[in-house]
Amino acid sequence: MTNQKVEPKILIVDYDKSILESLRKALELEGYVVDTAESGREAIDKSKALDYNLALVDVRLPDMQGTELLTAMRDTIPRMRKIIVTGYPSLQNAVAAINKSVDAYLIKPVNMNDLLGTIKTQLKKQFEELEYGDKQSWFCYYCGKSNFPERTTCWKCGHRRRGSG
Ligand SMILES: [Zn+2]
């Protein structure tokens, strides 16, 4: 158990600057630490530097699909919760999102209560996973990044796992 109060870090990825700013303000008011990116590439770079608790990603980005971005970030931040936002609530999108193991799904224009509720639920699930499950993942002693259990070297810096062999 830990009592330390650490504000969850959220990465918002959207090509629309006005949406980025309004979401940022709303989430910062709730006490979250918020970062933004306007493209998939920028989001991937940021995810290499900081472990976000949750990503809120528009399905349509200038340089890639939001679902592609989430797949790419699975390696950099395996435990990050992933929410897809789309203005096109088609069944196709929904199926694609589920296939890419997206954790939740929101329709544009985003209802703020839905958004905050979804974020709270996802962060709670993440906390439960960290507390009770997923104990196999390991943290690199060198750079602090978390790694999937099947890896023997850190994906980020290449250092070998210390401890078990
Ligand atoms: Zn490392």
Image (cartoon, grey):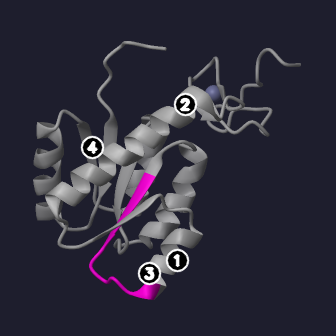
Identify the disc placed on residue 35: 4
Residue 93 is labelled as: 3
Which residue sits at x=56%, y=62%? 101
Q: Which circle's residue, 3 or 4, is located before the other in the chain?
A: 4
Mark drawn on residue 75: none
Amino acid, disc 3: Asn
In the figure, 141 relative to 148: above or below? above
Q: Amino acid at mark 4?
A: Asp
Q: In the image, ligand 1 is in what quadrant?
A: top right
Horizontal side of 150 relative to 107 (left or right) equals right
Residue 130: give its label. Answer: 2
On whether ligand 1 comes within 8 Å of the CB at mark 1, the answer is no
Q: Which residues are magenta?
A: 82-91
Q: Is mark 2 within 8 Å of ligand 1?
A: no
Question: What element does badge 1 sit on?
Answer: helix
Q: Position of residue 3 (x, y in %)?
A: 38, 12
Q: Are marks 2 and 4 in contact (CB under 8 Å)?
A: no
Instruction: Name the N-terminal-most of marks 2 and 4.
Output: 4
